[in-house]
Image (spheres, helix red, strand yellow):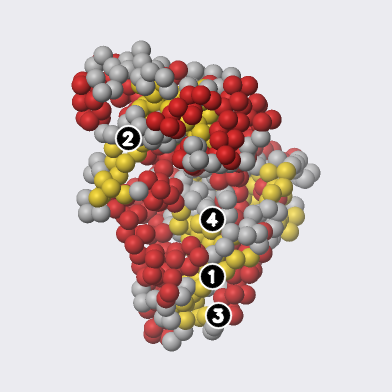
Amino acid sequence: MRLDTLDRRSAEFVSSFESAVDFFARIDLQGRFLHISAPGLAFIGYHREYLRIVTLRDLVPQEEAPLLEACLRQAQTSGDVQKCTLHLIKTLTYPRLVELRIAPHPADSGQLLVVGHDVSAWADNEQCLTYAMYHDVLTGLANLASARHEIERAKQEALDEGFRVALLQIDIDEFHRVNRAFGYEAGDRILHETALRLKNACHGREFVARCYSDAFLILVREVPDRAYVEEFARRISDAIQLPYSHEGQTLQLSVRIGAVLFPDEANGADQLLYHVDEALACAGRSPGYNLVFYERRMSGGMSDSLKLESDLHNGIRNGEFSLHYQPISDATSRKVVGMEALMRWNHPVLGPVSPEIFISLAESAGLINFLGGWALKNACMQLMQWDAMGIHLQYATVNVSAQQFRDARFASSVRDAFKLTGVAPQRIVLEITESVLMEDPDHAKLLLEELTGLGVRFAVDDFGTGYSSLAYLQSFPLAALKIDRRFVNNLTVSRNDQAIVDAVIGLARTLGLELVAEGVETEAQLERLRASGCGLIQGWLVCKALPISELARKFETGELQPAS
């Protein structure tokens, strides 16, 4: 945009400001941006198009909005330059402390000129630290620590004045798909816009906070009844479901909302936060509006799950996790070709916890990427250790969860494992399921091509239980298929399972893929698989999954022998 024609002196004055200050903008009396300098745009980090739909008020934290409002109002009424120091929310970095000078436009009474200087470096360190302790970096909203204080304050007000308080937790459904499709920077911008929409949808004394990732909290005072909360939640949901725009593309989000009332169902900040999380967990994942109020019956199964999640964090810190290894053997010689690394958790009280339980728990707690990375690095190091012991295996296989596979940093974490351990990428096979491949075939193909370019190989685990097609399999750079144990279990008695196994073996042969049969427990199963042309087996017939020390003894005694 170009500046309106001013007299030469004013034009030169404004031009000098544009190049000399951190932030220069022209706004109307409602705070909408009419012009912003290039340095100003770079300073705050937003796209110019984005600033068309927000106001200057939207770029300051909630609690500092009254200060800005007063400054704008005084500039309009007095005609003099007004000064205020507040935080300006930037994208992807911490908010900056800025000294703003606001003055009426010399040639247009309907406009204001805004000049800003970054004074963060001059600010008192304690003030900066205090701000960071209680605010979310990305959105400028209050964070969870700040929300706890506000909830306690609202609770006391409710008791003193005799009104209800509602706490709502809003979760954006499947937000990871946005990050995967458009990138993390775009995802952060959409989260920032979501924060603005939430603030704009609040018309009273509501308090808005971002608690984590794509989840937000809203505290509502003076709630007459549930119907009031339902109407408020619908307004919030409608605001978020309006289309978002990114580089000419539009996308639509849906939300789940959990709600809890005080003093009806909770008696303190921690209990409110705990119960609203339980309510959110019960909200359905379907398009549109999903609101669930907390009810006491919800607390039955959640406490054990949350306790176990806490134990999971402690278990990681205390070294309670380990890898057991199960041999993958030649179907004829039974010599060990490779090992599958399988994660185990030995709980100090409960004993061994089923992987089905703790893997799911790690995914919901956001810990699976850490655990998956740890497993890969340890498997690589174990290969090197076996080499040093004279036990030369061709490869180790490591399972990759759907959440790991979606993560934009997955490929770099795999590279890091090789750099750290020095193991050759060709000696690692990553196991993924059909459903992971088919969730986003284009993404899967690109990621597989990137990592196979390093030498990594991929195997499809539990093959036959998903929904992939021959056409899709042909398009992926795969190295192996693993026949699911459920087809092997009844191989000698079920014609259907025999037909499925024969078909998978034929498919693998056609595509030039290695084939591993899982769950082989009897000689009869082994003979049937060998007769059908299956070259590799895995199961208790050869050896169950064991810790490293027990495997070492089996290699020492000759009970297990490496193929190479």
Q: In what quadrant of the picture does the C terminus appear? A: top left
Badge 1 or badge 3: first in the primary sequence:
3
Say which residue label 4 marks.
60
- What whole-number distance in Å separates the C-alpha atoms at marks 2 and 4? 56 Å
Q: In what quadrant of the picture does the N terminus appear? A: top right
Q: Which mark is residue 545?
A: 2
Residue 350 percent coordinates (x, y): 25, 54
Badge 3 or badge 4: first in the primary sequence:
4
- What whole-number distance in Å separates the C-alpha atoms at marks 1 and 4? 32 Å
- What whole-number distance in Å separates the C-alpha atoms at marks 1 and 2? 43 Å
Q: Nearer the viewer, residue 550 or 246?
A: 550
- What whole-number distance in Å separates the C-alpha atoms at marks 1 and 3? 11 Å
Circle 4 packing at 10 Å, graded few (<14), some (14-19), many (20+), is many
Q: What residue type is labelled 3?
A: Arg
Question: Residue 399, located in which quarter of the rendered image?
Answer: top left
Q: What residue type is labelled 1?
A: Val
Q: What residue type is labelled 4?
A: Val
Say which residue label 3 marks.
226
